[in-house]
Image (cartoon, rainbow, N blue to C red):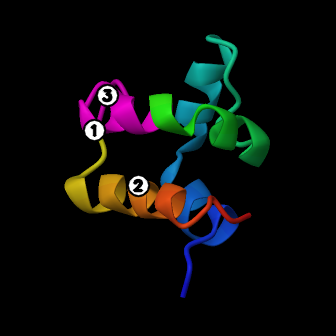
Amino acid sequence: MELSFARDIRPLIRESDVECMVDYGLDLSSLSEVRMYAEQIYRALAEKRMPEDIPWNDENIAKFKRWMDEGMDA
């Protein structure tokens, strides 16, 4: 089954992450914005720069990449 933003990716993004990134002009709760900046978000996740306090584990980073590779379904 293909991954979806609503079911598989959005639950990984904490509300504190959303609030933090709004200050930088990025709404992580928005599918269209996450799609638009997916490459940059992935790079920050993979380099463990995002989220700032507790980086995602490798499994969740791979899930985000797989979602991207599958076409970033809603």
Instruction: State the quadrant of the N terminus.
Output: bottom right
Q: Secondary structure at mark 3?
A: loop
The x and y percentages for residue 44 are 36, 29
Residue 22 occupies which quadrant of the picture? Answer: top right
Q: Secondary structure at mark 2?
A: helix
Q: Nearer the viewer, mark 3 or mark 2?
A: 2
| Amino acid beneath label 2 | Lys
Of all residues, the one furthest to the top in this rendering is 24
Q: For residue 44: magenta?
A: yes
Question: Label for residue 46?
Answer: 1
Mark 1 crowd level (few <14, some 14–19, many ≥20, 10 Å Cα): some
Q: For residue 9: magenta?
A: no
Q: Which residue is disc 3 drawn over?
A: 53
Which label's residue is closer to the chain start, 3 or 2? 3
Q: Secondary structure at mark 1?
A: helix
The x and y percentages for residue 12 are 49, 55
| Amino acid beneath label 3 | Asp
